[in-house]
Image (cartoon, rainbow, N blue to C red):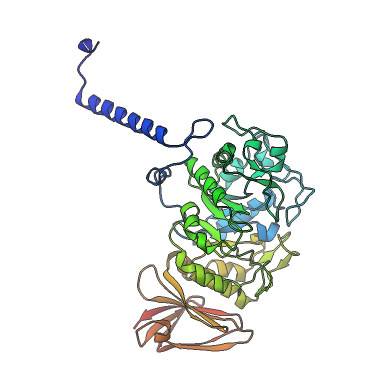
């Protein structure tokens, strides 16, 4: 009885009051928010959602990393991945590079480089989720999944990423496998009328079905348990755009409590959906696959020159935590089994490679290099480890195209320090050209500026205009400081 209870101390009373208040808040939230089949909240108000992941903003600067697609297609194995991760940690990590990513079909026991083979043999767990093929990733055996490999990556001070295709394995639907932590099954999630037009591994998910969110929750929990830091999701931002699945995946990843970057692929993502993508993802592709070409009139693949128009449209929509992605950097050795074409050294000239790095940096695209890193020569390594160029990608602001002709593109940005400018000049012609503009042509009011060539690490003195001989398909990148 209350009359026989001991008096509450002041601090005990405060704690009890706080407990009661929090309990009431929880009850109110549970009454308002919809729940899934097992009573877990699937939708959080923005104010609460922003508190589910503590720590710094996800992808505060454009992610920098390596992806296996350009060098290995779908064929990479554990030994090859570890060798690239070791090289990455030794040579690129000191310059701010972080992510190493296994691309498509790591769950196929008999892969072909381009993927999507009708003879593929898949590995699926009892809950209808792809798991690594142990014949390629032996550390994943006995239900370990990618956790041992992720632990290895983390031991190098790096972050680990994987590629998936939106939807649910067709095999899971045929067998009507259960969805973990629910009383639902694969048929309660799948839209069997929806298949990715260029990869037939999966069915899409029907957002009107109760199992759709539950299935995405289940794979997100699996990946979080493995220690995944980035998920690249394909067939979702174009060919076709799937806004409902983007939203469900984003929510599922957030519910894990682990900070996992969401990268949307392929492109071109619809620019009219920019606000929606910025709400749910950290990266999204602005074009179809970029390979080692200067230009291609066809939709696939695209070349370096083809990115200029898209870059001009998207650059202003970059913001911390949300980055339009110009696709991977097809540099160095594209082999032994690239996702497109035969094994080769990149066909881009050195000037075109520098143009690629300069454009990606001045638009603040994520920098994700492909190819076999262990075969990198000094030239390729130098492209990826120039701290002055990397600073443009990671810390510049106000990035915009100020001159656009059929022959020339000129871009302007401001350093993170707020002092001076960056100026990038591109020659789009097949022959060397002299490019000259007065400072006021670029919107700058000064009469003289001190120039520094960021690629050459060389101060060039004062100049009263931009006048430079640019090689065919080449670029220069300057820092420009007031006199």
> Camera-side residue: 402 or 342?
402
Residue 195 visible to an observer of this rendering: yes
Q: Is residue 297 left or right of residue 158?
A: right
Point 65% across, 39% down: residue: 129
Image quarter where the N terminus lies is: top left
Q: Is residue 68 left or right of residue 34?
A: right
Image quarter where the C terminus lies is: bottom left
- The spot of residue 54 in percent (x, y) is 40, 45
Answer above or below: position of 459 versus 189: below
- The spot of residue 340 in percent (x, y) is 72, 62
- The spot of residue 180 in percent (x, y) is 59, 33
Residue 133 visible to an observer of this rendering: no
Point 35% across, 73% down: residue: 419
- The spot of residue 69 in percent (x, y) is 66, 58
Point 58% across, 71% down: residue: 307
> Camera-side residue: 9 or 255?
255
Q: Is residue 375 left or right of residue 93?
A: right
Point 54% across, 46% down: residue: 249
């Amino acid at each position: 009885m209350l009359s026989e209870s001991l008096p509450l101390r002041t601090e005990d009373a405060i704690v009890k009051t706080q407990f009661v208040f929090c309990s009431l808040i929880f009850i109110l939230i549970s009454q308002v928010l919809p729940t899934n089949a097992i009573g877990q909240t699937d939708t959080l108000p923005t104010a609460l959602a922003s508190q589910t992941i503590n720590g710094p903003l996800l992808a505060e600067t454009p992610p920098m990393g390596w992806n296996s697609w350009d060098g290995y297609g779908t064929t990479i194995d554990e030994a090859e991945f570890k060798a690239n991760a070791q090289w990455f940690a030794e040579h690129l990590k000191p310059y701010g590079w972080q992510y190493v990513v296994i691309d498509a079909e790591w769950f196929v026991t008999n892969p072909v480089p381009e993927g999507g083979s009708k003879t593929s043999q898949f590995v699926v767990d009892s809950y209808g989720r792809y798991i690594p093929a142990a014949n390629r990733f032996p550390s994943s055996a006995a239900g370990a999944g990618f956790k041992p490999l992720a632990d290895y990556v983390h031991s190098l001070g790096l972050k680990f990423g994987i590629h998936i295709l939106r939807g649910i394995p067709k095999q899971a639907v045929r067998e009507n496998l259960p969805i973990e932590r629910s009383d639902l099954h694969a048929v309660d999630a799948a839209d069997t009328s929806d298949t990715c037009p260029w990869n037939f591994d999966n069915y899409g998910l029907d957002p009107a079905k109760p199992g759709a969110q539950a299935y995405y929750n289940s794979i997100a929990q699996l990946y979080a348990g493995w220690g995944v830091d980035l998920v690249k999701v394909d067939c979702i931002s174009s060919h076709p755009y799937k806004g409902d699945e983007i939203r469900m995946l984003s929510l599922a990843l957030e519910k894990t409590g682990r900070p996992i970057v969401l990268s949307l692929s392929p492109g071109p993502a619809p620019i009219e959906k920019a606000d929606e993508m910025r709400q749910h993802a950290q990266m999204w592709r602005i074009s179809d696959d970029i390979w080692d070409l200067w230009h291609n009139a066809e939709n696939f693949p695209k070349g370096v020159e083809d990115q200029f128009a898209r870059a001009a449209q998207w650059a202003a929509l970059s913001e911390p935590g949300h980055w339009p992605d110009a696709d991977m950097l097809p540099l160095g050795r594209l082999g032994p089994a690239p996702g497109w074409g035969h094994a080769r050294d990149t066909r881009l000239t050195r000037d075109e490679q520098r143009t690629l790095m300069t454009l990606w940096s001045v638009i603040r695209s994520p920098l994700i290099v492909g190819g076999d890193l262990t075969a990198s020569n000094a030239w390729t390594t130098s492209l990826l480890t120039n701290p002055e160029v990397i600073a443009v990608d990671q810390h510049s602001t106000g990035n915009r195209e100020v001159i656009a002709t059929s022959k020339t593109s000129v871009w302007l940005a401001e350093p993170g320090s707020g002092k001076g400018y960056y100026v990038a000049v591109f020659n789009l012609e097949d022959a060397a050209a002299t490019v000259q503009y007065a400072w006021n042509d670029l919107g700058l009011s000064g009469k003289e500026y001190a120039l520094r060539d960021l690629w050459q690490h060389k101060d060039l003195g004062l100049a009263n205009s931009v006048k430079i001989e640019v090689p065919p398909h080449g670029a220069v990148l300057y820092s420009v400081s007031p006199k």
